[in-house]
Each structure stands twice: as C-alpha cells, then as structure tokens.
Image (cartoon, rainbow, N blue to C red):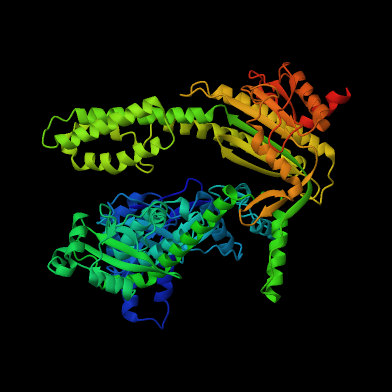
Amino acid sequence: MRLATFDFTPFEIKFSFHRLVEAMHIFINDPKKNDIKKTYFKDLLERVSEVPCLLEPIIDAKILDDNRVLINELLEILFPIALTDNEIKAVGMPFQNLMFNHSRRFRKIIEESGGNYNIEIRDFSQHQYYIASCCIIMNHYFKANFDLTRPLFIDLPDAKEIIHHYRVLYNADFVEVIPKENAVMLTKEDIELLEDNFDDLALWKEKFPQHSWQLNGFGIINLVDVTIENAMSLLKENFLKSELQSVCIGNIMEPLFSSIFRVPNLRIGFTPLIADVLIQKETNEIMAMSSFLLNEERSSIILSKKAQEAVVNQKGYYSISDIDVALEDEDEREMCLHLKANDIKSCLFSPVVISSGIEGVFEIVSSEARVLNSVNAQKLNGIMPIISETFERVKADMQNHIEAIIQREFTTIHPSVYWKFLEEARRNYIDSVVDKDVYLNPISFKNVYPLYGEIDIKGSGALRNEAIFNDLKEQLVKLIAIFDNCSLQENALILERHILKLQAYLRQLENNLVSGLEQRIQTYITKEVHPYLTKEEHLFCKQKLEDYFMFIDMQLGIYYRYRKVYDTQVAKMNKSFSDLLDFRQEAVQKVFPHYYERFKTDGVEHNLYIGSSISPNKSFDFTYLHNLRLWQLQVMSEQMCVHYRNNIQDALEMDVTVLIFVYDSSLGIQFRLDEKRFDIDGSYNTRYEIIKKRLDKACVKGSTERIVQPRKITIAFASNYHLEEYLSYIEFGQKIGLLDNNLEQFLIEDMQSVSGLIGIRIGVNLDYNIEDLDYNTLMHRFLRSQYS
C-alpha cells in the first residue's frame, strides 16, 4: 500500500533522521532526564553512528530496507510497542509513494485491502495539494499564518469488502523546510497577493517554482477510524442534496449502511403504508428502493402482528436475527417465509415518521443470519431522524413539483397576466388579516383585441369512426376464429352460443355502425367473453389467444389497434402544432406582452388578447396589434408546411385546415374562478364566442362547400373593416413566397344568430423554406415593404 502522489510539487523531498537524532542528544544532555533511558539512547546512537548514511539525507530507498531493524529501534520512541495493535501509524512524507515502519494494525489493514492499494485522499486535487504545500513553506519559513487545515479522509476496504473511512493526520515535528537556489524570496506584498488568489494556480507556481524548496526529515502519518461518524456524515450529505430526486438514493445508501453496521452487502428497502399507488411509485422509482415486505402478486403488505405492534403502533424498531428460528413462531411464519424467499436471513424494520404520521417501514436486510439484531439496531437512533426528514422533504418536493406542473400545464395563468393575480392575491391576504370575510375581486381586462385561430384535421370524425369500425370488426373476427378452433365437446353449448352472438354482432356492424352498437359489443365482450377465455384458456389455441390479447389495452379494456394508430398520429400532430406555436410565442411576447392560451382537440386552437390593460406599464400602439396579426398568419402557414412535410410517412393520410377569425372591435375578458380559465366578459360580447364555435362548420354562401379547405388558410371577418389590412398581409406573404397567388373572396352563409360574415382563402406554398422566417424582424420587413 502506498499514498497516491501528485506530479507537481514545490518540494524536493529527502528522508532524514537528523531531527530525531538531535532531539535524542538534547535528551541525553538534560540532567533532569532518566539515567536509564539516557544510557539506552547513547547505546542506540552509537550503533546509528556506525551507519553514516542514516545521518544524511536518504535518497535511495534500499538504505531503508537494508537497515530496517535499526531504524525500527530508532523510531521505537515514537512507535510504542504496547500501542502497535491499536494505533494506525507509519513513517512517510505527505502525498509521497513511500511509507515504512507501519504499526501492526496498519499492516493488517494493508493486508486486508489486498496489499497493493493506493491510498487516495477523498476530494483532494493536485491544485489543493500544491497550494497546501506552499502554505507549509510560508508558515514554516516566512512565519505567515495561513490556516489551510481541513479534515482529510481516505476510504479503504477490509477483508469483507466493507468500506472503512479513516481520517488522515500528519505530524511534521521532524521536518524542516530549506530554500534551494531557485526559490523565490517572498515579500509582504507577495504573501498578501497569494492570500487573495487561491484559485490562481499559475500565480502560486510562479511564486513557488517546482522543486524550488527542500523538505528534509520525516513525517508521521496517523489514521483514525471514523467509519461510523463519516458514513453518517456522508448519509446526511447525500440526503441534503437539492438534486436528491434526480439520483438513485437507494444505491447510495447500501454501501454506507454496510459501513455503519460493519456488515457486507446490506440491502435497503422501504414499504409505504399508504394505499396510494402514486406515492408507492414515487418512492420506488425516485428513491430507488424496493420493498421486501410487499407481496406484489397480492398487492398486500406482509407484516406480522408483533412487527405491526412494534413498528406501527409503538413507532419503534423490530429485529429478527435469524429467520429460520423465527419461522417456528406461528405469528411470524408468513412474514418470515416471504422474507426467506427473498434470500433474507436477518433484518431490521423501523418506522419512517413524518409530520403527517407514519409514512412507511424502512427495511435493512442481510443474507447472513445474526448480523442484524436488537443490539446493533440501536445505531438507528442516529440514522432514522435523517431518513425521516429526507422522506418529508422528498414528499414536499414532489407536491411542489406537481403543483408547478399543474400551474404550467393545466391552468391559464399566463405570465403576461400573472401580475394581476399576484396583485389581487396580495391585496386579499393583507385584507384578510383584518377582515375574515374578505372576498376576491374579479380578475378582468377591458378593451383588449382578440385573435383566434385553429388548425384542424379534416374529416377527423370519419377517420375516428373508421378506426373504431376496423377495431371492432377485427376483434369479432379473431374471437370467432378462437372459438371455431376449439374442438372439445364438453362446452359445446356455451361455445356455440358465443359464436352465434359474435357472428350476429359482426353482421350488424357490417350493415351499419349505429349509435350504441359499439357499447353493446364492448359490454358483451368485456363481461362475458373475456372472463370465459381467461377461465377456460386451456380449451383454446395458445397462439391465437396471444395474438388476440396483444392488441387489448388493459387500461381501456378495448381492442386497441387501429384506434391506437389514429390516436398516436393525432397526438403527434397536436404536439407538433403546439410546440411550434409555443416556441414562436416566445419571440412575439417580447414585442408586446399579450395573453395567450391554446387547447388541443382534433387539432389545436388558440386565443390571443392584446391591449393596454394587459400590460399597463407599457405604451400600447396599434402597430403591436398589426404585428401580432401578421405573426399569426405566418405561424399558421408554417404549421401547415411542417405538417405536410413531416406527415408523409405516417400510417394515415391526414389533411389539415387552417381558420383565422378577425373580430371587428375590442372586448373584455374575465377569469372564471369556477372554471379556472378566462372567458369573454359581458353579454354584449357573446357574439364573438358564438361565431367562433360555429365558424369551422360554415359553408360558402349559396353552396355546400365548407369555408375551410385542406392546404389553404381561411380568414373570416365579422365585417369588412379589417379586410384591406389582411389583404396587405397576404400580399406581403406572396412577395416572400410563403403564400401562393390563388386568392378567393366570398360571403359566408348565415348561421343562427350570425350573419354578414365575409371570408378570404389563400393557398400556402408548402415548399417554402420556413427557416427564412425571422419573427424578430417580421414587422420591420412588412413596414419596409409597405413604404418602399
């Protein structure tokens, strides 16, 4: 075993015993010292003087080997024989690869660790070593007062491969520091400069060139076993990490507990006592701990009455030192059989107690009998408070993350209007201190200008119905084939009934998928056919059953093949539309803050509201509204381009339509506390919502042609007030090549409570290079095109 060394050092190191010899001479010349010991020292020094090389700096390690017996006797004053089995000591220089004169306990540690083992000081780098060496020089030679003391630790395995932690102590009483020719003599200013620049290694190397100082003598290295204390400290350190939920904490704990209990290969587990699947999932996956008391087949916890009483009722520890012996106790038998099946011979159980009560059972188990017992269970007194606090924090962090996700994903408190909610919440809190009956004022914004758009899958209803039809037909055909293939006669009557009923449903389905037929088929299959197939599976062809059930979605309880293709593709398309819209929003929000929300259906809808009331600290100008309208037109064109380029290889061919609705006046919006979303404020503004809901099904006036068409953008106007404005946007889009030249203008049919709408339709150039769309300079380009 040797200390790991560093490549760069300001020292040239030479072993020497001259400081020890000088100390012995001083002892001999002191009249107050013991005469017997003086005689012994004189004799020892006479024998040392016969080997002159021991009184000079030693460069060749062979000298140490050749004179090992004499050197051991010389060092005996520092290495008492009576303590050699207790102390962990050796002679050596800091961070050098040569050590000798080990105490017996040190030698035993070396042998158990494998003999040829490099001691690496934990978290100690070349940078830290170099500066520590420089500080030794400044303190010894320049009489500075640099305090760089810090605990140094090494980690070594024993014969059982249990990691032990040792604190490293150095005694430098027999060392002297001497400058060489290339040593730099430091001034007060140099020392102060170094004091302020710990991280500037180049500066330290400039003031202390490599090998510019000589270190003569020898040091004494002491190791102190601090395994339990250090393992406890590491346990706290790992549990207090802010990124706890992103690491497998269970994997970290097992070697630490092995060190604390001095038992190799301990396993750590946790069993939640809360019947909440999400909490169990969170514990097992985030904390990376399995459960040894949970019977997964029965989804139940196997805990004996004695263990239940000790852990849950009394909130104490429970230990079994030998599972085989405990099996003789009838009360313990079921639990012990379960533990033995998991290769457990001894175990400790402890409650994890948090502020809300007992969270679960913390488990420490071993494959060896009698290594865990009621005596070493007392070590848990210092451990369980740390673990309980960690579980409390993980649970609180999980709740905070969940609430953050809900806030981000499922509510409509957009950053542009968050200030209003914050302002009202503060007012409500302050007022509630005085008046308990205080209520929340409505969150509303007046005189905002709405923009609405949607990108939708054309004929999505028909595609969904076709997928449902195909699933039901294939399911019925496969079930009939399964029953037909059964040749046994003992259940012939039941088999025939199922075949006839399935064939009847298949005929009805092929004639017409009427309302309610799907539900009747699913109810029959779920409640009658599937239970029969499961109970009597030995009657049927195993391969046909596997081919059938591989398409059954166990959560939905339906045959889910064609619908899965449809749902997956729709979800993929919607994510693409939403991600693009969200991403493009980041740029346009910086121009002028506005409220933005989107909804996923068979496509993606979005609402935008802009006005001075949403951002009262900024000066609103209609140029910002025009910029947002142009942005909306271009980003929806981009969505269409992206869809038709990325959708070529998908299983289903899906066309999309784009609709933009332009309202002719401003309106007000208000946050509905019961629905947790914004809605139009005031009955006089309901016309806007009515038009939005009916517009995508509208036809061109005097025809049956829908106003929305694939590969085209339809813009509907409540009046012709903004028509010219949008025509200029379209002209700009045509100039840059994003839109084609096939512009159509038409009247929109009258709908219930809605009339007088007009529309325009323009094709999108699907080959346009959308990378050229620079949304940061969009309005500038448009304005220059208008006035050039």
* Image location (x, y in percent) of residue 445: 76, 51
Q: Quarter of the image for the C terminus: give it.
A: top right
* Image location (x, y in percent) of residue 79: 33, 68
Taking the image as drawn, is residue 354 in sight?
A: yes
Taking the image as drawn, is residue 82 in sight?
A: no
User: 379 above or below 554?
Assistant: below
In this figure, what is the number of numbered marks? 0
Q: Residue furthest right?
A: 787
The one nearer the camera, 311 or 104, is: 311
Q: Residue furthest top?
A: 741
* Image location (x, y in percent) of residue 361: 33, 65
Q: Residue furthest bottom?
A: 32
The one nearer the camera, 193 or 76, is: 193
Left or right, residue 514 beside residue 718: left
* Image location (x, y in percent) of residue 692: 68, 38
The one nearer the camera, 617 or 540, is: 540
The one nearer the camera, 99 or 169, is: 169
User: 648 above or below 328?
Assistant: above
The residue under the point 16% across, 36% down is 493
Name the quadrant containing residue 341: bottom left
